[in-house]
Amino acid sequence: MTKLIAETAWHHEGNFIFMKDLVTKICEQSSVDIVKFHITLDLDEYMNKDHSAYDLLSSWMLNEKNWEELINIVRDNDKELMLLLNDTKAV
């Protein structure tokens, strides 16, 4: 059986309202079966502070409450979740 996956990573650029609207639209207005999130809660564990993207990604971090709300949108719309958990805190 083929399933359609909608995947999102860092393209929200830290804008939770954008991400929430995107996930809501994906769940309510598409035929997607699975929504995949890349969740990072501890950037220091995920990436070395010397990495050229560290400061930028640091400003883009969503918090636990944000991720919980996004996950609940997916669940409330009876979509499957696929999670890529990037650090121990995210697990």
Image (cartoon, helix red, strand yellow):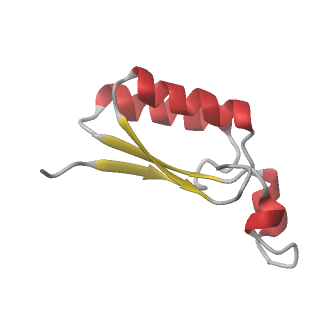
- Compared across the picture, whether 66 is left or right of 78 comes to right
- Compared across the picture, whether 44 is left or right of 21 comes to right
The percent coordinates of residue 48 (x first, y second) are 82, 75
Nearest to the observer: residue 6 or residue 86: 86
Which residue is rendered at x = 71% and y = 46% of the image?
14
Which residue is rendered at x = 83% and y = 64% of the image?
44
Considering every residue shown, the one lying at the far top of the view is 76
- Compared across the picture, whether 55 is left or right of 30 comes to right
The percent coordinates of residue 5 (x first, y second) are 32, 50
The percent coordinates of residue 68 (x first, y second) are 62, 31
The percent coordinates of residue 47 (x first, y second) are 76, 70
Considering every residue shown, the one lying at the far left of the view is 1
Which residue is rendered at x = 21% and y = 49% of the image?
3
Nearest to the observer: residue 89 or residue 63: 89
Total marks in image: 0
Nearest to the observer: residue 51 or residue 40: 40
Which residue is rendered at x = 28% and y = 40% of the image?
32
Residue 49's place in the image compared with 1, above or below, is below
Residue 11's place in the image compared with 71, above or below, is below
Residue 85's place in the image compared with 50, above or below, is above
Residue 17 falls in which quadrant of the image? top right
- Compared across the picture, whether 43 is left or right of 9 comes to right
